[in-house]
């Protein structure tokens, strides 16, 4: 996996040394459920996820430069609504004690640049569950265009069913957004 940097962050592949940092935020009942997954029950569960990320090679560990702590993840996945090879869908999660500092907006902006300039993607999409206002703000700040709300798209581990707001950005829209910002 490529290693890419922004002003305050390093986006890199996972190593097993990231397990404790992942576990630290994955047990938080405010973090996982916003992304649709159950809080981790133990360190072994986090290790299993780290090993899956290592094998997948499509999820970045987000490392804060100031203290080298792994504070979140950002994945570039196959778009679940578009069957095109040059389209990716972004998914992310961030440790709660890092919310409100602009880290995820910074990481997403850097991945947009990487995706359009290095991977030569035509479009990137992203979504959030309609109750997740923090994620919506990140998405809007990064210039994504709202496509609509998909109703009842996700059955969470606890039986709750959620609607999903869907966004995308083309390379041309991203380039225009760079001029404005």
Image (tube, helix red, strand yellow):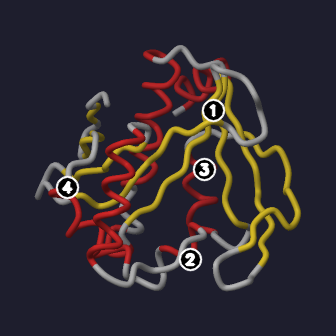
Q: Report how far apart the C-alphas of labels 3 and 2 lie in the structure.
A: 18 Å
* N-terminal label among 3 and 2: 2
* N-terminal label among 1 and 3: 1
Q: Mark 2 — residue?
A: 33
Q: Which mark is residue 124?
A: 1
* N-terminal label among 4 and 1: 4
Q: Are marks 1 and 3 in contact (CB under 8 Å)?
A: no
The quadrant of the rendering that contains the N terminus is top left
Q: Nearer the viewer, mark 4 or mark 3?
A: 4
User: Residue 168's quadrant in the figure?
Assistant: top right
Q: Mark 3 — residue?
A: 139
Q: Position of residue 85 (x, y in %)?
A: 65, 20
Q: Are marks 2 and 4 in contact (CB under 8 Å)?
A: no
Q: Position of residue 147 (x, y in %)?
A: 82, 44
Q: Are marks 2 and 1 in contact (CB under 8 Å)?
A: no
Element assignment for label 3: helix
Element assignment for label 2: helix
Q: Report how far apart the C-alphas of labels 2 and 4 lie in the structure.
A: 24 Å
Q: Nearer the viewer, mark 2 or mark 4?
A: 4
Element assignment for label 1: strand
Q: Mark 4 — residue?
A: 16
């Amino acid at each position: 996996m490529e290693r890419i940097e922004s002003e305050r962050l390093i986006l890199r592949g996972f190593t097993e040394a990231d397990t404790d940092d992942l576990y630290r935020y994955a047990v938080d009942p405010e973090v996982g459920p916003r992304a649709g997954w159950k809080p981790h029950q133990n360190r072994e569960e986090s290790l299993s996820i780290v090993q899956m990320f290592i094998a997948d090679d499509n999820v970045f560990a987000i490392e804060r430069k100031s203290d080298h702590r792994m504070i979140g993840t950002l994945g570039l996945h196959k778009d679940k609504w578009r069957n095109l090879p040059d389209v990716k869908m972004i998914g992310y999660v961030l440790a709660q004690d890092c919310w409100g500092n602009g880290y995820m907006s910074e990481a997403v902006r850097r991945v947009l640049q990487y995706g359009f300039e290095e991977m030569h993607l035509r479009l990137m999409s992203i979504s959030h569950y309609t109750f997740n206002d923090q994620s919506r703000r990140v998405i809007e700040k990064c210039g994504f265009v709202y496509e609509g709300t998909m109703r009842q798209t996700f059955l969470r581990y606890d039986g709750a069913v959620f609607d999903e707001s869907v966004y995308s950005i083309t390379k041309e829209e991203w380039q225009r957004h760079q001029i404005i910002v």
